Amino acid sequence: MSTNSLKKLLTAVDRWYRRHGRKLPWRIGPAERDAGETPDPYLVWLSEVMLQQTTIPHATPYFDAFRKRWPTVQKLAKASWDDVSASWAGLGYYSRARNLHACAKAVAELGGFPQDAASLRQLPGIGPYTAAAIASIAFDERVAPVDGNIERVVSRLHAIGSDGTEAGWRAAKQVISAHAQALVNALPKNHRAGDLAQALMDLGATVCTPKNPNCLICPLAEFCEARAQGDPERYPVKAEKKATPTRHGSAFVLLRNDEVLLIRRPPSGLLGGMMMPPTSAWSEAKPEDPLGEAPGKFAWNHIGEVRHVFTHFALKLTVYRAEVIARPKVHGEWLTHEAALAALPTVGRKAVALALGGARPR
DNA sequence: AACGCGGGGCA
DNA sequence: TGCCCAGCGTT
């Protein structure tokens, strides 16, 4: 694309963003930036981590809660893992919470966030995308964050596809990133890199959508290669997904007066570091003896089934309940019903809510 | 380079 | 039921 077209394109995006950009709780809009307001790197970081592979409606209440409870990175650094994990419960990808906590401690120790992408990249939980996003949005560094939205916008703009294989899609992403960076490099001096990044994300989320992109209102329409070809929805061509098998297991909800027994899972792996009721191992074959791995000989009542879909497998959990009459065989923590439900990841909350009789909204 | 890792909304 | 999505860390 010619330098002249690039300038026109960037001007069109800027105009569109000022008029149609989303108002988001963690965002300083272009008008406020013009008025001298600057983003808080802590809130930019917090939002970006929460939004990794997560939709805005799902992440927003968590962002509000974290911001209210821990207004600064120093406060978050001093929080306990008990509190951070319970506050993250339900948001998913729990290694993010562990890395968030570790990152807060590192940043507090440093005395503040590093202000360039290369340094940010060194921190736990901050990969190429998040480093570039924070650097551009919070510090106006001219680097290009490439998330799923920008990937789609740029792949259509330049009609960059792939053969649908892992390797092919990986190669395509490299080309897409180079084009994204070229856009940033062509930015006029008086434009902010962070505004461009957020504009392209908004465009991808609201106009250049995966299905039925609305090219009629798109500021990039006249520049878009995929549209010129007649079928923008064909791009990008990502790698094929794998099938998700079903696994089976049992969950054991032990009750003592108005309390539930939960155990803390090991820090890495599935639901790492999170509370859960005791469960059996999960296998692809239906267990022959569902009570075989119960945490003690109690009068187990079969309550029902819970279904839950993880990233790479579906789980059918048979839920049992018993009143404790002796010391359980597992080392755990007794929590009130309310505290337990609040601290549990979704699959655990489903199981415990079923055992306690009645689902409960988070 | 491949894999493990949540959750919810939608067609 | 399957598909989509503001990625990162480990192996």
Image (cartoon, coloured by chain):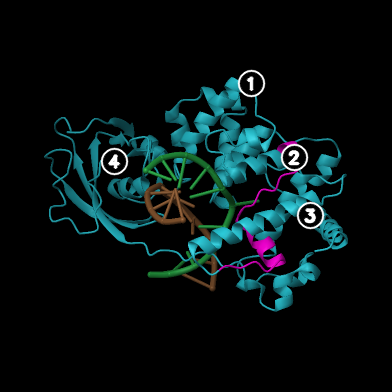
Chain colours: A cyan, B brown, C green
Quadrant of the rendered image containing residue A203? bottom right
Query: Residue A17's mark?
Result: 3
Most extreme residue toward the bottom, as rendered?
A: A230
Q: Is residue A98 left or right of residue A8?
A: left
Check disc 3: other Cα within 10 Å, few if <14, some if 14-19, many if 20+: many
Q: Nearest to the eye among marks 2 and 4: give it.
A: 2
The residue identified by callout 2 is A141
Label 4 element class? loop
Give me the chain letter of mark 3.
Answer: A
Q: What residue do we see at 87% from left, 45% from top?
A: A189
Q: What residue do we see at 73% from left, 71% from top?
A: A225
Q: Nearest to the eye among marks 4 and 3: give it.
A: 3
The residue identified by callout 4 is A277
Q: CA distance from mark 4 to mark 1?
A: 39 Å
Q: Which residues are magenta?
A: A138-162
Q: Is residue A42 left or right of residue A85?
A: right
Which residue type does callout 4 highlight?
Answer: Pro
Q: What residue do we see at 55% from left, 41% from top?
A: A62
**Mark 1 / mark 2, whichever is N-terminal:** 1
Expressed as whole percent of the image width and height from the top left, the position of residue A156 reads 68, 67
**Mark 3 / mark 1, whichever is N-terminal:** 3
Expressed as whole percent of the image width and height from the top left, the position of residue A186 reads 82, 52
Check disc 4: other Cα within 10 Å, few if <14, some if 14-19, many if 20+: many
- Say if labels 2 and 3 share a chain: yes
